[in-house]
Image: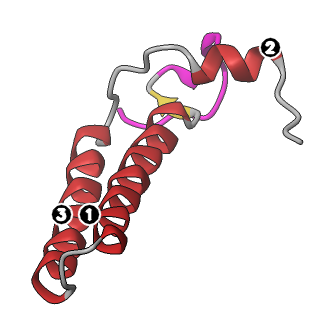
Amino acid sequence: MLNISAKDLDNLFTYHPPVGNDVDTYQQIRQAGHAFATVICATVPPSDDRDRAITTIRDAVMQANAAVACAPKYHKGGFLGAGGVIPGGPTVGP
């Protein structure tokens, strides 16, 4: 059983625009998923299992990207959590 708070739900079901190097991270994750799926398609005979393997890779890419999007972020000026920037939190950048 998951212990999910209302704050957690808000974070999970809120749009999180990319910040920092998120776009590059998403691209790296998608490229790795694509490369793995390409190997599966090139080496595994067509079958329901191969189809499920591709679907699982796709799911993993989506879950990884969601983990990046929903993770707390460090921003210039403070720490960005589900409620916005928290002044005085850890910062990055000039």
Front position in the image: 40 or 36? 40
Q: Report the Cα–Cα distance between label 2 and label 3.
A: 35 Å
Is 23 displayed left or right of 55 in the figure? left
In the picture of the structure, the residue carrying the numbered disc 1 is 33
The residue positioned farthest toward the front in the image shown: 47
Range shown magenta: 77-94
Residue 78 drawn at (x, y percent) = 57, 23
What residue type is disc 2 on?
Answer: Ala
Asked whether residue 81 appears in the rendered view, the answer is no
Q: Residue 6 has which mark? A: 2
Asked whether residue 26 appears in the rendered view, the answer is yes
Marks 2 and 1 close (CB-CB < 8 Å) = no
In the picture of the structure, the residue carrying the numbered disc 3 is 34
Is 42 displayed left or right of 73 in the figure? left
What is the quadrant of the N terminus in the image? top right
Total numbered circles: 3
Residue 77 drawn at (x, y percent) = 50, 20
Q: Report the Cα–Cα distance between label 2 and label 1.
A: 32 Å
